[in-house]
Amino acid sequence: MEYITYKTEDSCMTVFLKGHIDSANANAVEKEIGEALDRETPDHLVIDAGDLTYISSAGLRILLRLRKEMKDLKVINVSPEVYEIFDMTGFTEILDIQKAYRVISVEGCEVIGQGANGKVYRIDPDTIVKVYMNPDSLPEIHRERELARAAFVLGIPTAIPYDVVRVGDGYGSVFELLNATSFAKLIINGEKDPMEVAAMSIDLLKLIHSTVIKPGTMPDMKAVALDWADFLKDYLPEDKWAKLHKLVADVPYDMHMMHGDYHIKNVMLQNGEVLLIDMDTLCHGHPIFELASMFNAYAGYSDVDHSVVKDFIGIPYEVSVPFWRESLRLYLGTDDEDRINEVEEKAKLIGFVRIMRRRIRRNGFDTEEGRKEIENAKAHILELVDKLDTLTF
């Protein structure tokens, strides 16, 4: 029929509605949908209204009857005009009705931030968009929005997303950031001395780490780190793995907030105010886990190939490593090199556990480069496990 088409994947049938659905064709539309359901016997039903330009009360009654058959029925890609009909008739309160997303392009746009799950682009002087790597990222986007709001309410200066858009085959979150510049760009452009940026960065990090959150608000980073350690059980000598696991397990439970992916591409300066972006990694835990993530960003991921950090956060290895050391000095509030080295070794152990797991999971054994990185991380882990008796400081 010209008004509908459908497809079925993984027990979910998607029906695509087109044009006008009104009293003139409602019976035929409903009949064809019913026949398709009988043939396909799906467990879930989605109505894609991307090409639907109008729906009358007769069409709305079809949806009510379908909902009795398919309890989790949802309607997606609804245009503003059709959404208004659903809203005025109260259907938005009884059905899962999702608006169509504005489509934008990031081709030629400047990359101003990068995190574990996506890249941040400036699309105009006032606006940035975070584009997620996962094409099915809507749950991640909504989760990040809630995390950002929770942090903002607790006094963390964060950018709050105000719109969701389609970017290619995936999705993005849009933020308004007037005249905002990443800490990385401030260094690259020579606008700020790296050590000055380190001081601003650590001031914000200390604010984050001084913030106590309620249980259940954010993920527990210790549980994540234990998963990293557990993954390596088959790749390390049994006694070394057992000690590694105990070191991580012995880190005390901690309800202080952490960013989880803190580096100079995820912090912005806007009219003199420091703002945190890329909030999907927000969590809680002991600060050693945050320091491990920072070590990886500035040094660990580039330990074998020093050019990696330039591609990742935009500054050369010769700048990133001193920047990391200065950040650690400022965070600890000491010039004692022994103390700085002690905490760095603890951060390095967790950092290389993450790197080794990450490389193995990305088929690292299949390439010479990957094998080199895995062996390098393993060597660091074995050396540090022997030296350390605790990961706390």
Image (cartoon, rainbow, N blue to C red):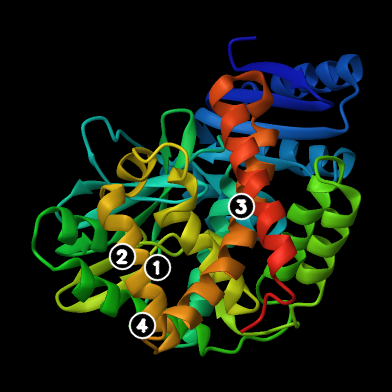
Disc 4 marks a residue whose amino acid type is: Leu
Q: In the rendering, which numbered label is found on residue 160?
A: 1
Tell which circle, 2 or 1, labels the residue nearer the N-terminal end: 1
Q: Do the residues labelled 4 and 2 touch (CB within 8 Å)?
A: no
Q: What residue sits right under mark 3 in the picture?
A: 352
Front residue of 333/223: it is: 333
Dot 4: few (<14), some (14–19), or many (≥20) neighbours within 10 Å?
Answer: some
Disc 3 marks a residue whose amino acid type is: Phe
**Residue 161 image point, x, y percent:** 40, 62
Disc 1 marks a residue whose amino acid type is: Ile
Dot 3: few (<14), some (14–19), or many (≥20) neighbours within 10 Å?
Answer: many
User: Does residue 279 appear in this view?
Assistant: no
Q: Do the residues labelled 2 and 1 touch (CB within 8 Å)?
A: no
Q: Are marks 2 and 3 in contact (CB under 8 Å)?
A: no
Tell which circle, 4 or 2, labels the residue nearer the N-terminal end: 2
From this view, report whether residue 102 is shown above or below residue 239.
above
CA–CA distance between discs 2 and 3?
A: 19 Å
| Outermost top residue | 1
Q: What residue sits right under mark 4 in the picture?
A: 330
Q: Which residue is drawn at 82% across and 35% down?
A: 44
Q: What residue sits right under mark 2 in the picture?
A: 323
**Residue 281 image point, x, y percent:** 55, 61
Element class at badge 1: loop
Element class at badge 3: helix
Dot 2: few (<14), some (14–19), or many (≥20) neighbours within 10 Å?
Answer: many
CA–CA distance between discs 4 and 2?
A: 11 Å
Q: In the rendering, which numbered label is found on residue 384?
A: none
User: Does residue 223 appear in this view?
Assistant: yes
Tell which circle, 3 or 1, labels the residue nearer the N-terminal end: 1
From this view, report whether residue 10 is shown above or below residue 281.
above
